[in-house]
Amino acid sequence: MQISRDGVMFLDPVTALNLLFDVVILLLGFYAYGKKRVALLLWIALGFCFFAVSYILTILGFGASLILIPLRAVGYLSIIAGLVHYIQQR
């Protein structure tokens, strides 16, 4: 949440849209993993879970917190690990 000059709180639309997309990808990743049992899908879902948590913290007012850096880094590393694991299996 952000506060405008006149003191009104508002939600940044970019942050809200990123959170929405992260949750959709997270849910699709878990659903697809349940149907296909491909570990890459689980890794991607896990990565977007970390992204979603970071956007939730941003909405709650922790946008300047240093916790966002490791959260997003772990999200990216989860996706990278899933891709490396997938490539090594092929």
Image: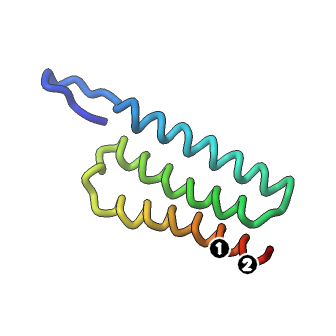
Q: Is mark 2 in CB contact (under 8 Å) with mark 1? A: yes
**Position of residue 34 measured from the top left corner of the image (x, y, whole percent):** 82, 55
Describe residue 45's horizontal placement relative to residue 32 as left or right: left
- Look at mark 2 in the image and give the residue it sits on: 88
Rendering colour mode: rainbow
**Position of residue 58 measured from the top left corner of the image (x, y, whole percent):** 35, 46
Describe residue 7's horizontal placement relative to residue 82 as left or right: left
Q: Amino acid at mark 1?
A: Val
Kindly state the secondary structure of the residue where label 1 is placed: helix
**Between residues 36 and 6, which one lies in front from this camera angle?**
36
- Look at mark 1 in the image and give the residue it sits on: 84
Res. 70 image quadrant: bottom left
**Between residues 79 and 57, which one lies in front from this camera angle?**
79
Describe residue 18's horizontal placement relative to residue 81 as left or right: left
Quadrant location of the C terminus in the rendered image: bottom right
Farthest-out residue, bottom: 88
Q: Residues within 10 Å of mark 2 (few under 14, many from 20)?
A: few
| In this view, 57 is above or below 9 | below
| In this view, 50 is above or below 13 | below
Kindly state the secondary structure of the residue where label 2 is placed: helix
Q: Residue at x 70, y 52 (%)?
A: 29
Q: Residue at x 40, y 38 (%)?
A: 15
